Each structure stands twice: as C-alpha cells, then as structure tokens.
Amino acid sequence: MSDNPYKPYVPADSKMREFTIRALLLGLVMCVVLGAANAYLGLKAGMTIAATYPAAVIGMAVLRLFRGSILEENFARTVGSIGESVAAGAIFTIPAFVMLRIWKFKPGPSLMNEYLTACALMILGGILGILFVTILRRVMVEDRTLPFPESVAAGEIHKAGQRGTGAAKQLFAAMGVGALIRLLGRADGDTLDGLGIYYAVNRFQVGIGRLKEGFVRLAADRTIPAGGITTVTAPAATPAYLGVGYIIGPELGALNFAGGLLAWGLFVPLLVYFLGPAQIDQYGGNWGALTGGLYVRIVRPIAVGGMLVGACFTLWKMRKNLVAGVKRSIADVRSAATAGASTERTERDLNLKVVGLGIVAVFALMIALYFYFTKALPAAILAAIVMLVTGFFFAAVSGNLVGMIGSSNNPISGLTLATTIVAALTMVVVGAKGVEGVAAVLGVAAVGCVSAAVAGEMLQDLKVGHILGGTPWKMQIGDVIGVVLAGLVLFFPLYVLHNSDLAQNPATGGFGSPNLSAPQAGLMAALSSGIVGGEMAWPLVIVGIAMGISLILVRVKSPMLFSVGMYLPLETTFAIFIGGMIKGVVGKIAAKRRYNDAQNARLENAGILAASGLIAGEALMSLVVAAVVFTRDRMGQAAEFPAVRAFEPVAGWLALAVFAVLIAYLVFVPLRKAGAADEPAPPTAVM
C-alpha cells in the first residue's frame, strides 16, 4: 500500500447527513422493487442485471428533490442494490425445493413453514455475507491492486450527480414503456395474463418427413418408421428479453441463442423424427405435447450436463484470480485481526466483537435450521460447519473477484454449484438420504449462494463509500436492514408467479415450465437429487458433459451460457439474440458517425438505462398481473386477467408491431442521447 493516506471525496471530519430516515426508506423501496424485478428476470431468462446503476440514478434524482447529500445518495444506493443479491440467491435455490416436491408452495398448513424456512435461508445467508465482509473490509478496499471497476464508475456517477435527474427521467420513461407493452400483451392464446391485444409468444408446427410413410433403413432388410411434427417458436415480443440482449451484447446474445438453436433445431426435431411414430399415440395425437415431453425429459438433462461443465470451466478459467483471492483472503484475515480500531469516521466498521457474536449466533441458527431438514443432529452440525467454512471461503473469494472484475462478472452460479456438490457429498458421507438429505443440501446451497452474492455486492458498495467518504458501519447496518426486508418479502413474488402460472397452466405451469424456466434452480435440483437421492438421468447428463467438453475444445467463450440457452425456451433465447443484435446495430451506427469517447460513453449509459427500464417495467407489471390472476383464483373466479377479445384474430401478427416499437426505442433513444462531440464525457456505467 502507498504511504500516502487516501483522501475521500467527503472529508472524514465532515458532519454531512448520511443515515437518515428518508435515505433508508428510499433504499428499502428500491431494495424490494429491484430485488423483485431481478427475481422475475432470473426465473424467466436465467440472468439478473446489476442494480447498482439504476439504484444510483433513482437515489440521486429522488433525494435531490429533498436537497439530500451525496452521502445520503450513497447510503440509499447501498441499501437499494442489495436486494438484487438476495434475489439471485433466492432464484438459484428456492424454486428447487418446489421442483423436487419438497415444498408444496400452495395454501395449506405447510405454507407458513415454507415461508419461514425460505426467509431464514435468505436472511441468514445475507447477514453471514455482510459479517464476513465486515471482517475483511478495511484491508480489501484499501488495497490499490484491486481496481474495483464498477465501484469507481458508481463513485463517478455520484460525483457527477447533477446529471441524475435527467437520467432518472429516462429510466422511469423506459419503465413506463416496458410496463405498458407488457400490460397490452399476453403470453399466448391459451395464457390469459394480460389484455391480449398482442401475443408475445407465437408457435408454429413444422412437419419432419412424411407422416405414416417415412422410414429410415438400418440395413438391407430392416427399417424403422420415422417422421413427425415438431414445434418452432418465434422470438418473444417482450421488453425484458430484448433489454437483456441489449445489455449482454451481440456476442453473448448469439452464444445464448446458439444453445437454443441446437436444442430446438437439432435435438428436438431429431427425437421427434425417430420417436414420434412410436410415441404419438400415448399423447393422444398431440404433437405439441410430445415435443414438449421430449424436450423436458431428454434435452434438458443434456443441458444440465452442459451447465455443470460450464460452471466448472468458469471457475477453471478464473483459477488464478480464485487462488489469488484465497491467498489474499487469508492475508486479509490476519491483517484484520491485527488492525487496531480506527477513530476516523470513514474507517469505523461494526465492532469485531459484535461481528464475532453475530457469526456464532448465525451458526447456531443454521444448526437448528439444518436439524429441521435432516432430523439428525450430527448431520445438521456437519452441514452447518460445511456452510460456515464454504460460506466464508466463497464470500472472501466473491469479494476479491468483485474487486478485480466487478459484481456483474461474479460467477455466483459456479460458486453455488461448488457449494452444492460439497454439501451433497457431505450428506452422502454422514448417511443422510432421501428427502431430508436433499433438503439439507439445498439449504446449504441457498445460504452459500446468498452469502456469496451479498458479500460481493456489499464489498462493491463499501468501496464506493470509501471513495465518497461514507461511514462503513452505517452502510453495514443499512444492508443488514435491507437483507432482512428482502428476505421477508421476496418469497411472495416467487409464490405469486409460480401459483398464477400454475393456475393458468395446470399441467405444465410453475417453476421449470416454459414461462418460469429457472435454469439454475433446475441445475441445483438435479445435482442434489442426483447425488443424494440417486434420481438423476445420469446417461443423459453424461451426454451433456461430453457436449460441454466439446464446446471447450472448440473454444466456445462460455459453455455455461450456451447450455443455459439449451435449457431455456427458444422464444426466450431468440428474443435475447435480437436484443443483442440491436446493440450491435447501434454500435455500427455510432462507428459510422465517428462518435468520440464522450459520445460513446453517453450512448452506452443511455442504452443501459433504456434496457434496464424496459426490464424493470415489464417485471413489475408482470408481478401486478400475476397478483391479479392469483387473487381471482383464490376467490374462486377464473384464473385469468381481463382480456380484450376484439384483437384475438390479429393478436399474433401485432407482435410484429411491438417488435418494431421496441427496436426503434432501443436504437433511437441511445443515439439521441449521444449529444454533441464537444460536450464533456460523463462517467460510464460499467455493467
């Protein structure tokens, strides 16, 4: 470290307002809203978006109306962005309990137990992540070898806060567009989840070979019947998917779509061609049902194998950073243990005695929670120890990775996968089997996932506070409050989304369905039940593993993203791909116009705000629609949203008009915000 002490933007001796009721309330509202929006997006598309930039923009705009200070803005952003991390942990693991039928997730005597258990998993994981980061904060944020790219960007955005109001207007306008378009449409003709002026998803059936006449000759005197009808889906006309594609860009969008194309353009048609004639009678002649069954039962397990390899490969590619993170974490713990208490406001953390007692209390509560799962005290104690050790390890690694590459690139799914495998093998060793053992594995994975996600986000926010002159212990307390609120609330969006989809699609709806794919939760469910319960379709998973290795050998950039594309419905990956292409077109136009760095920075910021707003708007409106459907179903009414029937004959074609509007919005809004070449460069939103 340098001998010259770092001087924050707001001096340490300043008495500026920071932890105020208005900043806390604003942060908590953003925590819940952004957390719920990310929960929706994660269930639908298997991805979440960084909440730091939207939270910073909204916080600056709202607090500026009340003459708030920059430290209040920093505090509100800190609390507001933590909900995204809790949501990531929730969607990666909580739906797995439902997919494996460990939880009923329906009104009844067990619902309160499920709610309290889910809350405990999210809250304990979040608090544990905050406590671990508190131990390491000082040495990590002061380490000048860690660049913290997204923290620096967020700090610059706060410093340039005079642009906050205009950016907030753009964000809210995009949210309005996304919400309105979502309200006007509905998923398809059979799912009444919107006004129905247009259908977001349009499916077509395509013949493969000649039905009842086609055959494949295996030998001179041996043939088998072949031929059938497969399903092809147009891209979903939804603001959220196009927004996701815009944010991840054309390269990753194409990679995600390539996985979907392999699943629906090769595997499913091939299976239909060979198995269709023999299996179609079991489906009553319904080729759509047969296609869906083959996809869920055969193609998805192959995708799980690919995701397993992809997650491991992600960790392998980051092995140098991971090893450096482990070494640095050990050194950080030693440094933290010998560091004296600071009297400066900007260096005061929560008291280490309080942190230590908090960790002991969380450990005791974890033992009680895992005993509830396993009904065996030795297994519960061992599971809690595994969670504590892996939780600290991955929280420290997550924090260091955020310092190196930013929270948007933090491999939470890979870290959670490693925790799941360790926990599953531990349960096998202690003899915990069946539902109890699988539930304990998912419980360990849930706490570990939330802990790692919260630790990374918390450290990123603490670095922003270090740059701006925030008070660490106030930010830590604020995040504890945010984690508790998010843990208490995020169960409800998951519950409502699952049950409303199930009410509209009794045979195929809920978590794991085309409308709520939840790919990471599917992976965790498959692994935990496969290792502990012995219920995995291992031959298909091994095929997927071989596929994943092949992808590595041909140097595919992200086998994980490719495999997630296989797991998601084709309409999802297709729409994400189009969003990525829109981003590519905008980039080409900017290059043709020869924009300078300042114009490109404004273009990038405006594009991210527009895409983020579309995502958040659709997510929030979808939650409102799901709540209406859920309420009507519980009242004994039809499980549907009021629809406009007059447009049904042309609703499918009107999806083209929706695409035109969204494409125009994502192209012209960023280009219009690029500004003149002589305008000063804004801080760039590093996502």
Image: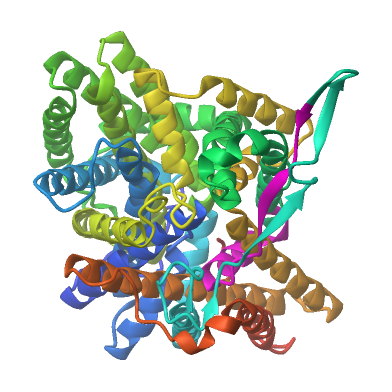
Name the spot of residue 182 as percent of width and height, x first. 47, 77
Q: Residue at x 66, y 64 (%)?
A: 234
Q: Is 97 or 278 nearer to us in this picture? A: 278
Q: Using the rendered view, name the quadrant where residue 236 is placed.
A: bottom right
**Which residue lies at the image location 65% right of the left edge and 39% below the top edge?**
276
Given residues 343 and 616, the one toward you in this image is 616
Range of magenta residues = 224-252
Query: Looking at the rendering, which quadrant does residue 227 occupy?
Result: top right
Q: Measured from the top left, where is residue 450 in percent x and y? A: 33, 44
342 left or right of 467 in image: left
Q: Quadrant of the C terminus?
A: bottom right
Residue 40 located within the stretch drawn in magenta: no
Whether residue 406 is visible here, answered yes or no, is yes
Residue 152: % across, % down:
50, 61
Left or right, 241 with respect to 73, comes to right
Q: Measured along the vertical axis of the image, is residue 371 above or below residue 63?
A: above
- Residue 179 position, x and y percent, is 44, 80
Question: In the figure, is residue 56 to the left or right of 683?
Answer: left
Picture colour scheme: rainbow
- In the image, residue 539 above or below residue 123: above
The residue at the point 12 percent across, 34 percent down is 365
Could you tell whether 465 is left or right of 182 in the image? left
Which one is nearer the viewer's eye here, 88 or 205? 205
Q: Residue placed farthest to the right in the image?
A: 220
Task: Mark yes or no: residue 344 visible.
Answer: no
Q: Is residue 228 magenta?
A: yes
Q: Is residue 561 above or below residue 356?
A: below
